[in-house]
Image: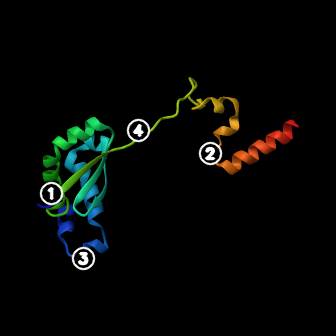
């Protein structure tokens, strides 16, 4: 018995209801399994190439060595001609905020020495930073 995604992928005019990209990205977890899907995420389909974001270079290398098996599994899940290639990309690392021992306050660690002396440097918007500094000058004058 065929899977629903495989049947939907073969139907004519189905692009009006659901795109091939959604079908391919939705079949990613089934093709690679829960553990790999937790570390690598199918992002989009460009022509017949599925773009996958991975955590680091090691995952990219390991998945690249498994690409033919993954492509076979995707073909079983969604049918032929939807996904023919994989493109694996490493995500930029996110820096998690450091928490205090109590767990409910953030510790802000300045990136440069100027931020240690002036708290206004922590304001990203230049207009708001200027307003903050002017208000602080009026209060201390």
- Contact (Cβ within 8 Å) of mark 2 with mark 4: no
The residue identified by callout 4 is 93
Q: Which mark is residue 75?
A: 1
Q: In this view, does 118 lie above or below 123?
A: above
Position in image of residue 129 (x %, y %): 70, 45
Residue at disc 2, secondary structure: loop
The residue identified by callout 2 is 124
Position in image of residue 110 (x %, y %): 60, 31
Q: Which of marks 2 and 4 is nearer the N terminus?
A: 4
Q: Tell me what residue is drawn at x 85 percent, y 42 percent.
A: 138
Instruction: Give the CA distance from mark 3 to mark 1.
Output: 20 Å
The residue identified by callout 3 is 13
Q: Residue furthest left?
A: 1
Instruction: Give the CA distance from mark 3 to mark 4.
Output: 40 Å
| Total tally of numbered discs in the picture | 4
Among the 4 quarters of the image, the one containing residue 34: top left
Circle 3 packing at 10 Å, graded few (<14), some (14-19), many (20+), is few
Q: Is residue 41 left or right of residue 121?
A: left
- Contact (Cβ within 8 Å) of mark 2 with mark 3: no
Taking depth in this image into account, of 49 and 4 the one nearest to the observer is 49
Q: Which of marks 2 and 3 is nearer the N terminus?
A: 3
The N terminus lies in which quarter of the figure? bottom left
Taking depth in this image into account, of 44 and 2 the one nearest to the observer is 44
The C terminus lies in which quarter of the figure? top right
Residue at disc 1, secondary structure: helix
Residue at disc 3, secondary structure: loop
Residue at disc 4, secondary structure: loop
Q: Which colour scheme is used?
A: rainbow
Q: Tell me what residue is drawn at x 24 percent, y 64 percent.
A: 47
Position in image of residue 35 (x %, y %): 26, 39
């Amino acid at each position: 018995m065929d899977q629903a995604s495989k049947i939907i992928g073969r139907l004519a005019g189905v692009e009006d209801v659901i795109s091939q990209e959604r079908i391919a990205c939705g079949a990613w977890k089934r093709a690679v399994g829960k553990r790999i899907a937790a570390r690598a995420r199918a992002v989009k389909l460009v022509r017949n190439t599925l773009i996958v974001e991975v955590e680091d270079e090691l995952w990219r290398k390991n998945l690249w060595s498994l690409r033919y098996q993954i492509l076979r599994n995707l073909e079983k899940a969604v049918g032929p001609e939807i996904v023919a290639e994989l493109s694996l990309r490493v995500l930029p690392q996110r820096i998690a905020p450091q928490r205090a021992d109590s767990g409910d306050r953030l510790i802000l660690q300045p990136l440069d020495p100027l931020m240690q002396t002036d708290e206004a440097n922590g304001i990203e918007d230049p207009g708001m930073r200027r307003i903050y500094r002017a208000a602080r000058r009026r209060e201390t004058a």
